[in-house]
Amino acid sequence: MNGADTAWIIVATALVLFMTLPGLALFYGGLVRARNVLSAFTQTYAVACLMSVLWLVVGYSIAFGDGDSGLWGGLGKMFLSGVTSESLSGTLPEVLFFAFQMTFAIITPALIVGAYVERIGFGFVLLFSGLWMLLVYAPVVHWIWGGGMLSDGGILGEVGVRDFAGGVVVHETAGLAALVIAVLLGPRLNRTTPPHAPWMVMIGAAMLWVGWFGFNGGSQLAADGGAAMALTVTHISAATASLTWALWERIKYGKASMVGLVTGTIAGLASITPASGFVGPVEAMFIGAVAGILCQEAVNFVRNKVKIDDTLDVFAVHGVGGIFGTLMIAVFGQAAWVAQLGGLAIVGVFTVVMTFALVKICALITPLRVDAETEVNGLDLAAHGERAYDIAS
């Protein structure tokens, strides 16, 4: 065990959890109507709790177990069987590696929440999220990261697919799942109401930005120069994408909005995630500059061209950003084009097919969508018996 590595990953684990709670919850909560803010909070918080338990029960074993099939890790590490405080994963206590990976398993299905807020059944959220994490996310983790995030142990990692911190594993899977659910769920009855609390969106985005240092910097799994570089390029990409998003918005609409500025931040962060261990600051600035415009145009395409109500633009920002960043690894010569394109295609098809099947199965067990009256009046009171404000707009 290396004490410095261990100390850094303890901090990184806390930072990645901070991304979801409270960062993502505030980011999503500010973007919805006032009568749905507690619903967005509750869905995000409950998903975080459920994923934590399921990761202990079997998720970690599927993703990082010692199974020999190459498709999944098996069941040998259910409930952390055989793992003690003395067990090691590289230079880290394995229980810490488990905890660090748990925070990734938390935020990935939590990202999908943004696609269906304001019209989804709470029971469906929990049932679908749990099954999706175990049957989609955890196997993909094993395929790409296998025996660890810096190893080539997975079947896709062995053939050269490179994803440093989750462009494919986290952002492509969550983005495509969000798109599938949005299509099957159908649009909201009211798509015109603006975000009820832009200040909350900004605070949530700022927390995500800070937490992302653990997300990408921690993925080095060591306290060394690689972690420092990953942290630095993460910041540069986020800052650059924020500016290009705002500039592009100003050129097209005459004004640069605050919500647009911070959405650009998230686009830059998602795009640098897979490449953060393979590029330097100049490449990161390029990735961020393109991401701010590319993801904004993806938002416009999904919303206005194909008219899919992905409520908070999960696919356009996270999915497109993650896919773009994954390809940039090949552009800058750090991976083969065939491997990157093949990995994206395999994971993409698997995610879409499995998500479609899980939505259909879960909808047979618990209602997919709330009734029209509940949607109009807001989910806070109907689903949770509370409301965020004395007067809900």
Image: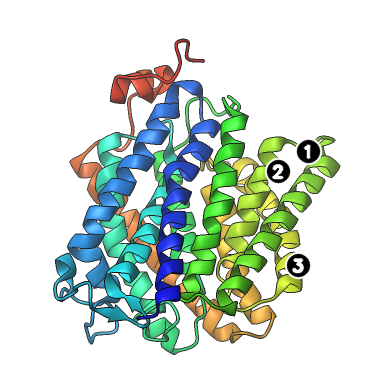
Residue on which disc 2 sits? 261
Q: Earlier in the sequence, mark 1 or mark 3?
A: 1
User: Residue visible at 21% across and 43% down?
Assistant: 364
User: Residue visible at 80% across and 48% down?
Assistant: 248
> Could you say which is closer to the camera, residue 122 or residue 188?
122
Total of numbered circles in the picture? 3
> Could you say which is closer to the camera, residue 364 or residue 325?
325
Q: Residue furthest front?
A: 3
Please state if 263 lies on the left or on the right of 131 as rendered.
Answer: right
C-alpha gap between disc 1 and disc 3: 21 Å
Residue on which disc 3 sits? 286
Residue 211, can we see it? yes
Q: Quadrant of residue 133?
A: bottom left
Point out residue 213 in the picture as x, y percentages from the top left corner: 55, 61
Q: Are marks 1 and 3 in contact (CB under 8 Å)?
A: no
Q: Residue furthest top?
A: 391
Q: Are marks 2 and 1 in contact (CB under 8 Å)?
A: yes
